[in-house]
Image: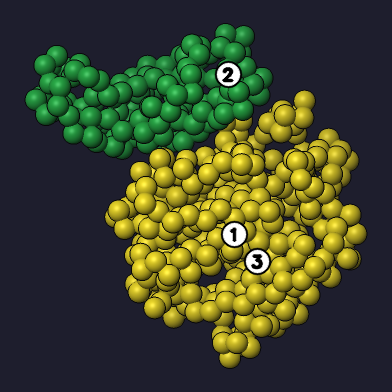
Chain colours: A green, B yellow
Amino acid sequence: MGAHISIPMYQRAVPQRYRLVGQRCLKCGKVNFPPKAVCKYCNAGFEFEEVTLSGRGTVYSYTIIAGGGAPPEFAEQAHCQGSYPVVVVELEEGPRVIAQLVDPPPAGITIGMPVRAVFRKIYEEEGVIRYGFKFRPA
Amino acid sequence: MSISVVSYGVYLPFLRLRREEYVNALGSCSADIKEKTVMDVDEDTMTMAVEAARKAVAGLDLERVGVLTLASTSYPYQEKVMAGTIVEALGLRKNILTGHHGSSTLAGTEAFLSAAGLLVGSGEKYALVIVSDAPVAGASAEMEHSFGAAACAFVLAADEQGLELEGFYSCVTESLGLRFRPAGEKEVRDIGVRTYSNQAYNETVGAAVKGLLNKLGQKPAGYRHVILHQNDVRTTVALAKKLGFGDEQIQEGLVYGQVGDTGACSSLLGLCRVLEKTVPGDKILVGSYGAGGASQALSFKLNCRLPGRSESFQVLLEDKKYISYTHYLKLKRSI
Ligand SMILES: [Zn+2]
């Protein structure tokens, strides 16, 4: 998450970052997200149909990033929030994705907790806002 | 051709700041709010716009959305096509007519009316209007105490049953020194003379509402709800009463006390709230305002119930977390 991503590289992934566009393998039927050249499930399928994921899923695992441990592009966020949770979400279509969780419940995050994707600023660099998805308790 | 709202969506940020936080930190609060909405560090008017719009277009055939208009006084960029973010986030078609409205809190109804006009002119089926605002003033400005954040979105349809736009009327006049922001600055200013700003508001909004009633041959009693722009409740209520509306017509549309001054959203957010309490046959009057100054009055009639919402306005008002004034200043990047 701390690696610099150039603007053209970010731009190419806009459909998946903004609205979770993935691909269904025409050979095995599994959904790849993010999209791949060859299906990661059957290792054989290379033809896909585009699918927009619902953004609904459950927490598969999570961790809390302490303020001091935040990569530089998240420094401003750490300044405001102290620490913030990062979750691995199992989407209802199957893929597991990693993202931040916003508005965590006061009682704490639990494995299996239902969440949904929300549209947020991920970070800003060179005056350019990088939007993408985070999750929120559903 | 008739133009009707066929669905809508509302987004309120999760964070809230109570009036008492100002009183405790500064000794007083110049806004007669109970609390107000506050964007989190990773929110801006575009992220709020996307969330409100996603609710509005749920279940809609996106291929038939041919018009997209936006309104905000506080876009995250001063120059860039903001509609691009919306088109990608929602998966709208790329052949879409756009309109970006800003520069005053009039922008909300401006975007609404321009979408209606583009719909008529283009022959498209649906238009999406997104109004998302979070006005900004310096921490030392009194005006700042009331500034909240919210977004609402409307799907307009040509020749379909819904909340029909019956008519509109505008009043534009030069008025100086009221809620303005010089080029290149981030924070709005005001000369701060309450009687002067109230007079401009009363004259401008009053003229638009009266003009609309005359044009349509309607009387205040013909409306179930009236919603006027709210940058403080007392002035709004006093004007509505002076125009001949009663408490029961005014109260439902008052959202200011719980969200604050939401700029371009103000009157349209009130519209979203009253829509839940409206039955077919009811008429609603909306009066927007932008300092500088202008007002647009819109008359609506509900012809059939709009699709049910996953969460009521009340649920959105209760889904919240209170923050301290110190946390608020951090979010405003003031400390
Ligand atoms: Zn496969």
Taking the image as shown, residue B81 lies to the left or right of residue B62, namely: right
Residues under numbered marks 3 and 1 in contact, where contact means CB atoms less than 8 Å apart? yes
Find residue B110 and report its image quarter. bottom right
Residue A113 showing in the rendered view:
no
Residue B133, given in percent of the width and then of the height, sits at 62, 49
Find residue B209 and report its image quarter. bottom right
Q: Mark 2 to mark 1: distance in Å?
A: 33 Å
Q: Mark 3 to mark 1: distance in Å?
A: 8 Å
Q: Secondary structure at mark 2?
A: helix
- Residue where numbered disc 3 is placed: B288
Residues under numbered marks 2 and 1 in contact, where contact means CB atoms less than 8 Å apart? no
Q: Secondary structure at mark 3?
A: loop
Please state which amino acid type lies under the numbered disc 3: Ser
Mark linked to residue A89: none
Name which of mark 3 and mark 1 comes first in the sequence.
1
- Residue where numbered disc 2 is placed: A74
Taking the image as shown, residue B102 lies to the left or right of residue B139, namely: left
The correct choice, above or below, for A111 with respect to B283 in the image is above
